[in-house]
Amino acid sequence: MINFRYHLVSLTAVFLALTVGLILGTAALNGPAIEAFESNIQSLRDSNEQLRSQVEQMENDLEDDQAFAEAVAPSYLAGQLTAKNVLVIALPGADTAYVDGTVEMLGLAGATVSGRISVLDEYFDPANADQLGDLAETTTPDTVTTPVTYDGVTAMSYVLAAVTTGEAAGATVAIAPGDITTVTTGLSELGMLTVETPPTGVADGVIILAGPGSTDADAADRNAGMVAFTNEYAADDPTVYAATTDTGDGNPLKTIRTDDAETVATVDNVAVLQGQIAAVAALADFINTNTVNHLGTGEGASDLLPAAA
């Protein structure tokens, strides 16, 4: 008679057989599995070493390129901007190192820096648009017509461009030192601007230095503001927008190359010395021959330097 004890013994035998089978199967596969695993690890190590070597080679190449650029910059740039006044503007994301580098290249070209200012994040915050609009109305010099626009960034950029370049909408205007101080102090008190070298109110050209653009929740408005800011300066003087890259959604440089390619020169690799040289060379070409260059390594760039185009 088949009873519970019989079923229990049968089930125990089945589980015992399964256990023995798993042990035997694991033992049989253990060697090949470990060998395959070790082979994969070695392959990854070899690949990692190869990539590390490639990175080291690229770093060495970059150092060589930088050294070469540093060596040829004085002779290449010499005299290109002699007796020219250049306004230097840093936007949010611009690193001091490449702003300083660009100023140094301007010196090699014979230019005089007629002002150096940094426009801060708060300037492009859409929450501050009304404040900017109000400030533009109260600080516009008597010699400048107050801009008609509902966009605070555009209005204030028009006024700032006028007092720092001595031109408004492409026409020369009389700017007193007090006009410059009124505007820059008003923006500084709002935490929107810092002044490294006080503007003289005279500029033959403008270099605007930037990072990759904004990527926060208000990125679309902030990036559009940077483009509007640049266009207000471009309406007054030859202007170069030099950034670290042309990639990223809404990148102002990409927008400028698409929409304003005939009125604003661009450089997309200003973080490296070659890009700083290119920014100065592009401005010189713009001022001297009215040629608008788009330089660098990204999409829309024609070449690294104007002379090679």
Image: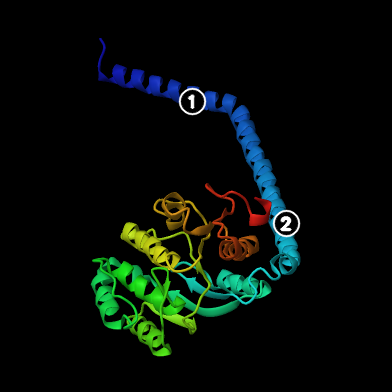
| Residue designated by label 1 | 22
Query: Within 10 Å of the Cα at label 2, are there few (<14), some (14-19), or many (20+) other Cα atoms?
Result: few
Identity of the residue drawn at 46% across and 66% down: 93
Task: Please indicate, yes or no, whether residue 10 appears anywhere in the rendered image.
Answer: yes
Query: The N terminus lies in which quarter of the figure?
Result: top left
Instruction: Tell me: residue 20, above or below residue 289.
Output: above
Amino acid residing under circle 2 = Asn
Residue 103: % across, % down: 59, 74
Element marked by disc 2: helix
Here the colouring is rainbow
Q: CA distance from mark 1 to mark 2?
A: 54 Å
Foreground: disc 1 or disc 2: 2
Residue in the foreground of this view, choosing between 251 and 301? 301
Residue displayed at 43% across by 74% down: 167
- Relative to 14, is 52 on the left or the right? right
**Local crowd size for mark 1, using a 10 Å CA cut-off: few (<14), some (14–19), many (≥20):** few
Left or right: residue 243 versus residue 182 is: right
What label does residue 60 carry, if any? 2
Q: Looking at the image, which residue sits at the far top?
A: 1
